């Protein structure tokens, strides 16, 4: 009797352990939980005239490598543009202060992310600084509109204040 | 002597619902007392949980595999096979995992609980316990109810994990989808709280509902072999209907 009682206990224990192991596997391997686990970050701001479908916690990438995530998105009620706070890992603290930020879409239908094109300035971005050179999210409707109205490839696509159009 | 009037179907169902509700309160009241029989709860976790593992794991694997196969075919029409991992994971975690596991659980564990308690009723073991001042609600019913609530979420996690592995097996190893695309798109779109935990919450509720129906049907069965047979059937039928209906309601509220 004691023997069988013991084996029930061990069996139930193994079952519960297996269940929680499966939960841990799901949480860490199939979700972006690992990306939430951030070390120390510093926050820089960027203004965009249109953020498209950018969402909170969207990745920030340099050369395609993730360096942080979008911390907050708010509307500046004076300038009427979107202020996006970018939380960047302190390991990447040497970003030149003339770096440019742009909103890209991963793939044709993928999620949007903030791509940063590093500049050449010797000064670096610090906590609370603002990235001046920004490029808004590309709107499909605007592109179609330009095709229909202009079709003139010599007219440059109008971007907001970004003379250098950054590439991710 | 006039025959007693047959109760209408509506009145009968209402009476069932009412007594099931009262039975639930009975179980909840008996839970503190049942903790003295904690060994019994552990034994029931083994019976309803660990013994259901084989069927749950097998079905999880095959559901994941067939989901991957079907979605690959459908997505390839739109050139969107890169989204395979995401779609499989979301449909498994949010819907298929909890619902299919609940149906399996009702068939595998619910029926055995009903038949066991029903036979205890039919062979007067429950009355004998009452005579010996052992409360059958605390010693028989409550441990099985707790075990159902504990086991279902764990079984669903195992089902989901096996489903993802099955989908990976078919999508990546067989159909040749890129490994990085499969996992990368999945991790980018699946949220821990909104998707994984949402499914776990759902499955906990399903576990409670199935355990309640199974113990109730067993406890209130007519003490005949035919009565036990009907009670076992009713457990599967009512559990399946309630789980699917409740699934719609919970999805509508939890979305």
Image (cartoon, helix red, strand yellow):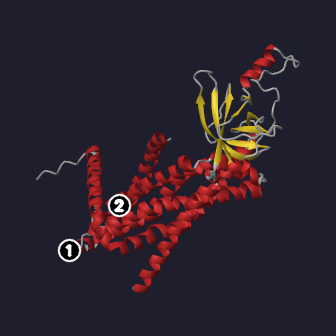
Q: Residue at x 72, y 22 (%)?
A: A141
- Residue B204 seen by the camera: yes
* Chain of the residue on which disc 1 is drawn: B
* Residue carrying label 1: B133
Outermost top residue: A149
Query: As displayed, is residue A137 above or below residue B137?
Result: above
Mark 2 neighbour class, 10 Å CA radius: few under 14, some 14 to 19, many 20 or more: many
Query: As displayed, is residue B222 above or below residue A67?
Result: below
Q: Secondary structure at mark 1?
A: loop
Quarter of the view holding residue B173: bottom right
Query: As displayed, is residue B228 above or below residue B123?
Result: above
From the viewer's side, name the closer residue of A30 and B165: A30
Q: Which mark is residue B231?
A: 2
Indicate which disc, 2 or 1, sits on the residue closer to the N terminus: 1
Q: Which mark is residue B164?
A: none
- Residue B225 seen by the camera: no
* Chain of the residue on which disc 2 is drawn: B
Outermost right residue: A154
Q: Are marks 2 and 1 in contact (CB under 8 Å)?
A: no
The label nearer to you, 2 versus 1, is 1
Q: CA distance from mark 2 to mark 1?
A: 27 Å
Residue B150 in the image: x percent, y percent? 44, 62
Residue B198 in the image: x percent, y percent? 51, 49
């Amino acid at each position: 009797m004691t023997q069988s009682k013991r084996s029930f206990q061990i069996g139930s224990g193994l079952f519960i352990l297996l269940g929680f192991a499966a939960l841990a596997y799901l949480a860490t391997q199939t979700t972006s939980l690992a990306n939430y686990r951030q070390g120390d970050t510093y926050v820089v701001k960027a203004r965009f005239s249109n953020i498209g479908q950018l969402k909170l916690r969207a990745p920030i990438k340099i050369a395609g490598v993730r360096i942080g995530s979008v911390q907050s998105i708010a509307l500046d009620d004076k300038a009427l543009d979107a202020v996006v706070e970018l939380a960047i890992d302190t390991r990447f603290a040497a970003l030149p202060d003339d770096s440019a930020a742009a909103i890209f879409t991963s793939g044709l239908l993928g999620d949007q992310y903030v791509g940063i094109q590093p500049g050449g300035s010797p000064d670096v971005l610090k906590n609370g600084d603002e990235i001046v050179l920004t490029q808004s999210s590309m709107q499909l409707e605007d592109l179609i509109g330009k095709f229909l109205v202009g079709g003139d490839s010599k007219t440059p696509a109008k971007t907001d204040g970004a003379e250098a159009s950054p590439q991710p | 002597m006039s025959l007693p009037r047959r109760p209408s179907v509506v009145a009968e169902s209402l009476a069932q619902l009412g007594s099931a509700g009262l039975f639930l309160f009975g179980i909840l009241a008996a839970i503190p007392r049942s903790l003295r029989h904690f060994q019994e709860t552990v034994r029931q976790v083994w019976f309803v949980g660990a013994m259901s593992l084989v069927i749950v794991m097998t079905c999880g694997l095959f559901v994941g595999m067939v989901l991957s196969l079907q979605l690959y075919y459908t997505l390839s029409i739109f050139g969107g096979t890169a989204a395979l991992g995401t779609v499989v994971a979301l449909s498994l975690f949010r819907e298929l995992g909890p619902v299919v596991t609940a149906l399996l659980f009702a068939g595998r564990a619910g029926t055995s609980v009903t038949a066991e308690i029903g036979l205890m009723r039919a062979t007067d073991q429950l009355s004998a316990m009452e005579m010996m001042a052992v409360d059958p609600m605390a010693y028989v019913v409550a441990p099985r109810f707790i075990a159902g609530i504990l086991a279902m979420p764990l079984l669903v996690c195992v089902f989901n994990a096996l489903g993802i592995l099955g989908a990976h097996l078919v999508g990546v190893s067989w159909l040749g989808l890129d490994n990085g695309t499969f996992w990368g798109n999945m991790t980018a779109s699946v949220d821990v709280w909104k998707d994984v935990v949402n499914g776990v919450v759902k499955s906990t509720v399903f576990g409670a509902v199935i355990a309640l129906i199974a113990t109730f049907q067993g406890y209130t069965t007519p003490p005949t072999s035919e009565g036990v047979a009907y009670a076992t059937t009713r457990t599967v039928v009512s559990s399946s209907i309630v789980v699917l209906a409740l699934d719609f309601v919970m999805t509508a509220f939890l979305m």
